[in-house]
Image: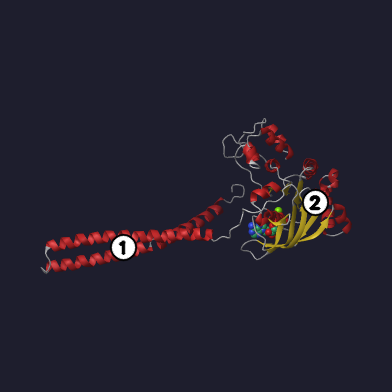
Amino acid sequence: MKIFGAVRYILAKWKALNKKVLDERVKTTIRSQKYFAISTGLMILWSGLIVMILIWEISHHAVSIGVFTSVISSAGTILGLSQGLSRTFSTLSQEHMIIKHYEKFLSLPEIDNTKREVDVSSPHIVFENVHFAYPNTDVEILKGVSMDFYANERISLVGENGAGKSTIVKLLCKLYQPSSGRITINGIDINDIPVCELKKIFSVVFQDYASYSLTLRENIAFGDIDKIADDTALADAMGQGLAIGILENLHRNLDTNLGKIEENGVDLSGGQWQRIAISRACLSDSSFIILDEPTAALDPVAEAEMYRTFAAVLEKKGCILISHRLASAKMADKIYVLKDGVVAEKGSHEELLARGGLYESMFRSQSSWYQEQDGEVSEA
Ligand SMILES: Nc1ncnc2c1ncn2[C@@H]1O[C@H](COP(=O)(O)OP(=O)(O)O)[C@@H](O)[C@H]1O
Ligand SMILES: [Mg+2]
């Protein structure tokens, strides 16, 4: 806010929002207290009327003081009781509002997570004509994506920003459901595979990976919480995730606090947090690993270096590397080029270059960019 001189603007926006929330609260309170208010108002009117009538009667000697007193006291009792009743009604209507939310939650479609086991050692993942639009939007992001891969393959998924690469990963993780078509692993619909089984098959580092303001140990161990006390496994995973330098910097103390919450917390750079996220994925025993834009925070030289190391590290595991930059694609066994919601091209680096299509033109324009950045990295 300071840098952009936006304090006054944001403050005004905050005040407007605050007023909106306050108005909403007043409205809700009025709605839920409606019965209470109406019945109390009627009661006051009614008792006022009775008292006035009685006073009129007394003044005309039609009623004795004794009768007056007993009528007033029993009217008071009735008033108290009916007030209790209307309070109950107002509570009921309040509870009704809460229950409506709960009913909405209960009516969400249920996903059966109890079924089918998959042979996690050699999974074959297939996208069959998958269509998808994000909830509450009309734009179809995926318009019939079909592709397949095995867990020991090195797959590269490329395409421009917004092509739908991250969306494909979200569908594979069951964060969303395809609008039509299906995703299967060894022929079984992923909806029939429990999430814990999916976790054994692949681990994911999302583009907007999480960085937890907890200890380094916890940050890595979330990849497989059973290994939280296993220092060797944690360090190994950090080696695979190219994060061993971070561990050295922290004097090999896995219990260092990271982030800004703890007073002694050490904050890391974007690239370092990303390596922590990759190490987290490496800790899991999954058959393959999905890396969404793993080098977005790196410069071209560091990017080339990272891919070389990955190629060695991921020899045993398969991987899906997702990027709008093509440096990753050369080391892949199979490349899928995504454009306008469909797989526009597929094949190896050489095949796609020879084809002279979209991949070839992307590669040409990007490699000239890499060459301008640094003559050495012309192979990128
Ligand atoms: N949660 C969301 N709701 C609505 N639209 C979204 C959402 N997430 C992404 N999109 C849209 O989907 C398209 C594809 O996004 P994404 O899969 O992230 O692209 P990529 O990873 O290839 O850059 C984009 O146009 C983006 O605006
Ligand atoms: Mg993305």
Q: CA distance from mark 1 to mark 2?
A: 72 Å
Label 1 CB less than 8 angstroms from ligand 1: no
Q: Which residue is mark 1?
A: 40
Whether residue 24 is visible here, answered yes or no, is: no
Q: Nearer the viewer, residue 351 or 30?
A: 351
In the rendering, which numbered label is found on residue 326? Answer: 2
**What secondary structure is found at the residue carrying circle 2?**
helix
Residue visible at 52% across and 55% down? Answer: 12
Q: Nearer the viewer, residue 40 or 89?
A: 89
Residue visible at 73% across and 57% down? Answer: 187
Whether residue 52 is visible here, answered yes or no, is: yes
Q: Position of residue 44 (x, y in %)?
A: 27, 64
Q: Residue furthest top?
A: 251
Q: Position of residue 253 (x, y in %)?
A: 65, 31
Q: Position of residue 210 (x, y in %)?
A: 64, 46
Q: What's the amino acid at mark 2?
A: Leu
Q: Is residue 33 left or right of residue 363?
A: left
The quarter of the picture where residue 235 lies is: top right
The quarter of the picture where residue 180 lies is: bottom right
